[in-house]
């Protein structure tokens, strides 16, 4: 009986976290304009287009509000073929220093 209770409690606790998305639970899409005004290390979700590759793992990302440089590691593409015409949704972290702000991708997917 005790094992059944513990197993049920564990199962329910895992199910309760099924909706959690990313550290901090960010689920709302924001614009690039708003994202680059946030504090360093803030988590954001942006939707738009990867316009071009600037350097290895550095891309220009654009939405209707503006554009920003974004670091996207090769493994973040997870074998998804993306062109500049494809709309993507990217969960990222704001990376601010003294003079510039960029985004660092953590998860990338085709937008629905």
Image: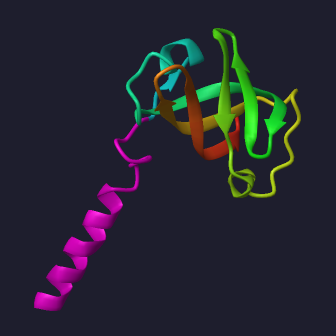
Q: In the figure, residue 50 lies in which quadrant? A: top right
Residue nearest the viewer, comparing 22 with 41:
41
* Residue 11, image x, y percentages: 30, 72
Q: Which residue does the image show at 17% across and 81% down from the upper left?
A: 6
Residue 1, visible in the rendered structure = no
* Residue 92, image x, y percentages: 54, 38
> Please, is residue 17 above or below residue 6 in the view?
above
Q: Which residue does the image show at 47% across and 28% down from the upper left?
A: 97
Q: Which residue does the image show at 20% across and 72% down from the upper left?
A: 9
**Left/right of residue 95 with respect to residue 84 in the rendered view:** left
Q: Quadrant of the C terminus?
A: top right
**Left/right of residue 48 with respect to residue 100 in the rendered view:** right
Q: Which residue does the image show at 49% across and 14% down from the upper left?
A: 34
**29 in the magenta segment:** no
The residue positioned farthest toward the top in the image shown: 65
Residue nearest the viewer, comparing 36 with 89:
36
**24 in the magenta segment:** yes
**Left/right of residue 76 with respect to residue 8 in the rendered view:** right
Q: In the figure, residue 110 lies in which quadrant? A: top right
The residue positioned farthest toward the left in the image shown: 2
> Please, is residue 90 above or below residue 35 in the view?
below
* Residue 32, image x, y percentages: 58, 18
> Please, is residue 2 above or below residue 76 in the view?
below
Q: In the figure, residue 67 lies in which quadrant? A: top right
Residue nearest the viewer, comparing 68 with 65:
68
Residue 77, visible in the rendered structure = yes
Q: In which quarter of the image is the N terminus?
A: bottom left
Give the residues in magenta.
1-26
* Residue 111, image x, y percentages: 70, 34
> Please, is residue 20 above or below residue 51 in the view?
below
């Amino acid at each position: 009986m005790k094992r059944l209770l513990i197993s049920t409690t564990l199962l329910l606790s895992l199910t309760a976290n099924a909706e959690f998305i990313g550290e901090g639970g960010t689920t709302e899409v924001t614009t690039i304009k708003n994202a680059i005004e946030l504090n360093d290390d803030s988590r954001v979700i942006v939707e738009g287009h990867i316009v071009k590759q600037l350097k290895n793992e550095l891309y220009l990302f654009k939405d209707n509000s503006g554009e920003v440089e974004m670091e996207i590691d090769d493994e973040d593409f997870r074998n998804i073929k993306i062109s500049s015409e494809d709309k993507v949704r990217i969960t990222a972290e704001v990376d601010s220093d003294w003079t510039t702000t960029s985004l660092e991708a953590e998860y990338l997917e085709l937008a629905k």
